[in-house]
């Protein structure tokens, strides 16, 4: 839980550099996810190396927020990039100009630790799954932002999409101008025999904390999220803002009942009770901090539920 240097001299390896690059891209990663990304014959020896880089090298850090959970000592440790690791990347010309977006947890806005860790678990699971395929390429938010219009790249918060929404409540119609900020964005490139196809996704990570409905569109709720994404796609705001041809919304919840309530609301708002825009999955281990999620391709290769349609497996074009 605290650094205890023994004066060990750290000689950095290529795998260490790859580790720093991963933690520059992700705000937080668990040790088992890091091992899944970087490999090595012995996971035990790999964890010892992480300890060396933490205690003596001060290249990586163990965020203190993880110790607040009762089961933290039985869980894979969570790591983030530290100042010495950033300096190594800077010296190698690998520290990108937008590193602060990752360091501050800003996939649009700052998140609480548990929420941000859940976002990282989701994206890392998808990226690990893609590494086991031959016809898919993971497009990170950096890849998307690099090809976005200059007007978007120059924004203080380039992930926030301004949108005007309205809804008829019992007391009348409300209209609100809001900024829709996904928890994360990524894309998939599908390589087929004669062409490449693309899907782009906004991620909403829900720890069963956001209410499904509220009578005020200026307050956070899933009603507001759903209305915003429907308007964004209907008006092509995602095309103007990010320059992407399509957008789907992946909602990962930690509670099956909560997910069903959100899906019911999507069905109510849809004209014919069906929607291809929203995809849903529940994974309880992402929220309870009693059992860490395993670095498996589950997020990528297992079906996502849809309202009024058959489930969709996103690793297939």
Image: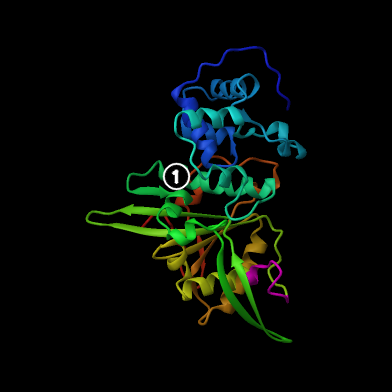
Quarter holding residue 72: top right
The majority secondary structure of the magenta stretch comes to loop
Residue beneath the point at 72% across and 86% down? 170
Task: Please tell me how crowded label 1 is: few (under 14), some (14-19), or many (20+) other residues with Cα within 10 Å.
Answer: many
Please tell me how many numbered marks the rendered image carries: 1
Residue beneath the point at 68% across and 45% down? 113
**Outermost residue, left side:** 194
**Residue 11 position within the rendered picture, expressed as x and y whole percent measured from the top left:** 51, 16
Magenta-drawn segment: 215-224
Q: Does the magenta stretch include residue 222?
A: yes
**Residue 80 position within the rendered picture, expressed as x and y whole percent measured from the top left:** 61, 35
Q: Which of 21 and 270 is in front in this view?
A: 21
Residue beneath the point at 63% across and 48% down? 116
**Residue 242 position within the rendered picture, expressed as x and y whole percent measured from the top left:** 45, 61
Residue 305 drawn above or below residue 117: below
For the N terminus, the quadrant is top right
Quarter holding residue 316: bottom left
Q: Does the magenta stretch include residue 189?
A: no
Residue 22 drawn above or below residue 236: above
Colour mapping? rainbow
Q: Is mark 1 on a helix, strand or loop?
A: helix
Residue beneath the point at 68% across and 47% down? 114
On the rendered structure, is 11 left or right of 167? Answer: left
Which residue was labeled with disc 1?
Answer: 129
């Amino acid at each position: 839980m605290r650094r205890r240097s023994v004066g060990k001299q750290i000689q950095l390896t290529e795998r260490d550099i790859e580790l720093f690059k991963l933690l520059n891209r992700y705000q937080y990663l668990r040790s088992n996810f890091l091992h899944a990304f970087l490999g090595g014959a012995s996971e035990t020896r790999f964890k010892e190396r992480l300890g060396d880089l933490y205690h003596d090298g001060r290249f990586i850090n163990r965020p203190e927020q993880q110790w607040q959970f009762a089961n933290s000592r039985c869980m894979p440790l969570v790591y983030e990039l530290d100042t010495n690791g950033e300096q190594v990347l800077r010296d190698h010309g690998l520290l990108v100009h937008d590193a602060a977006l990752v360091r501050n947890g800003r996939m649009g806005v700052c998140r609480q630790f548990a929420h941000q860790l859940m976002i990282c678990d989701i994206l890392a699971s998808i990226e690990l799954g893609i590494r086991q395929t031959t016809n898919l390429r993971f497009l990170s938010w950096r890849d998307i932002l690099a090809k976005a219009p200059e007007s978007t790249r120059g924004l203080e918060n380039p992930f926030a999409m301004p949108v005007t929404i309205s809804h008829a409540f019992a007391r009348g119609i409300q209209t609100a101008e809001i900024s829709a900020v996904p928890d994360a964005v990524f894309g998939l490139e599908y390589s087929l025999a004669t062409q490449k196809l693309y899907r782009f996704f906004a991620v909403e990570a829900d720890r069963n904390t956001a209410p499904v409905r509220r009578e005020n569109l200026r307050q956070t709720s899933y009603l507001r999220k759903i209305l915003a994404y429907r308007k964004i796609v209907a008006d092509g705001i995602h095309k103007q803002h990010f320059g992407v041809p399509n957008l789907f919304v992946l909602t990962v919840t930690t509670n099956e009942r909560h997910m069903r309530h959100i899906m019911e609301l999507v069905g109510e708002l849809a004209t014919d009770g069906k929607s291809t825009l929203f995809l849903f999955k529940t994974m309880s281990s992402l929220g309870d901090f009693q059992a860490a999620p395993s670095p498996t391709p589950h997020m990528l290769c297992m079906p996502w539920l849809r309202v009024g349609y058959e489930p969709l497996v996103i690793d297939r074009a």
